Image (cartoon, helix red, strand yellow):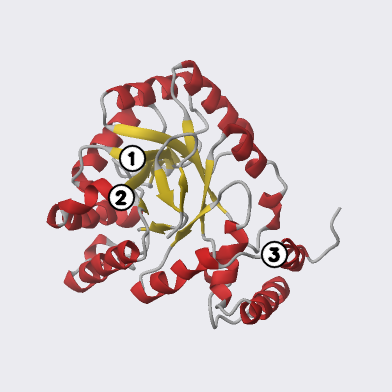
Amino acid sequence: MQSQLLGATDVAVSRLAYGCMSYLNTWSPAEVDATRVANAHACVEAALDCGITLFDHADIYCQTECERVFGDWLRDHPQHRGGIQIATKCGVVFADQPRPGDPPRYDLSADYIRRSVDASLRRLATDRIDLYQLHRPDLLLDAGEIAGVLRELRDAGKVLHFGLSNFRSETFDLVADACAAEGVRLESHQILLHALDPAHMDDGLLDQCQARKVTPLAYGPVGRGKLGDGVDSGGDEQVHRVQSVLDELADSYDTIRSNIALAFLLKHPAGIVPILGTSKPGRITAAAKAVDVDLSHTDWYRVHLAARGTKLP
């Protein structure tokens, strides 16, 4: 597996990451049984076998169970800790938490971030988080307060590097500049990004990542499944157009449709790291071959224009 540096750090991460949101294949803790746990561990091991080193979590995934199950695996395989990077996120609060009647919300207050980091460290069975990302932009966020608590967590050795997730470019700048004043850098921005969504290719987010030397982490990289192998378009005209182009290119590059969708993201000079989200170990193994597909400049535009459905401006 090829690697690249995370943001402006000297940390080498794999060109593909594995997203642990769906490896238990449920959002209900009550459904987590030995079979699901064994499959989750098999997914982690398949990713490792392919050379994937970056594992993406969030405290809300299966209501903390995804972190806990990964932590259990890590306790049994401590020899792997030094060769992987564990990423997780905080900031999303579900309805009725912690009290019945509490609304769903985003919370990026310093106290909430502190408590979330400590809880994730316990569940993940590790003494440090390699990449900690703020999951969603709290409308009441205080950039200076955030910067202060991130510096505190870094100085305590609890978190090595930081990033944001699902932020607008203006809010990213606000937080990044406040962090810089505290001597803290943001190294990543995790966003929904795939070939069916051409807007992000020219809305400035990827330009911002390049200018700030921030690594874009792309979740839903295969169109949230719509560009998967053998998936029908369901009558969606845009999906059908893109699937058709991907299939043609898959024949040309001797690969599969989903790997062309991943190669489309890997081609971008911003250094996008697609996050694989699947509960099937075999799909992880197949997807790892996408790093060997180097789309030509012309073929990249074939995919992009199919998604746009209109001429370039």
Check disc 1: other Cα within 10 Å, few if <14, some if 14-19, many if 20+.
many
Q: Secondary structure at mark 2?
A: loop
Q: Which kind of residue does numbered mark 2 sit on? A: Ile
Check disc 3: other Cα within 10 Å, few if <14, some if 14-19, many if 20+.
few
Give the numbered dot on residue 296.
3
Quick check: can you spot residue 235?
no
- Residue 232 position, x and y percent, is 59, 82
- Residue 305 position, x and y percent, is 77, 64
- The part of the image, by quadrant, that contains residue 277 is bottom left
- Which of pointers 1 and 2 indicates the residue nearer the eye? 2
In this view, which residue lies farthest toward the top? 181
Residue occupying image coordinates x 29% and y 63%: 44
- The part of the image, by quadrant, that contains residue 38 is bottom left
Give the numbered dot on residue 130.
1
Q: Are marks 1 and 2 in contact (CB under 8 Å)?
A: yes
- Residue 58 position, x and y percent, is 36, 48
CA–CA distance in space, label 2 to label 3: 31 Å
Residue occupying image coordinates x 20% and y 74%: 35
Q: Which kind of residue does numbered mark 3 sit on? A: Ser
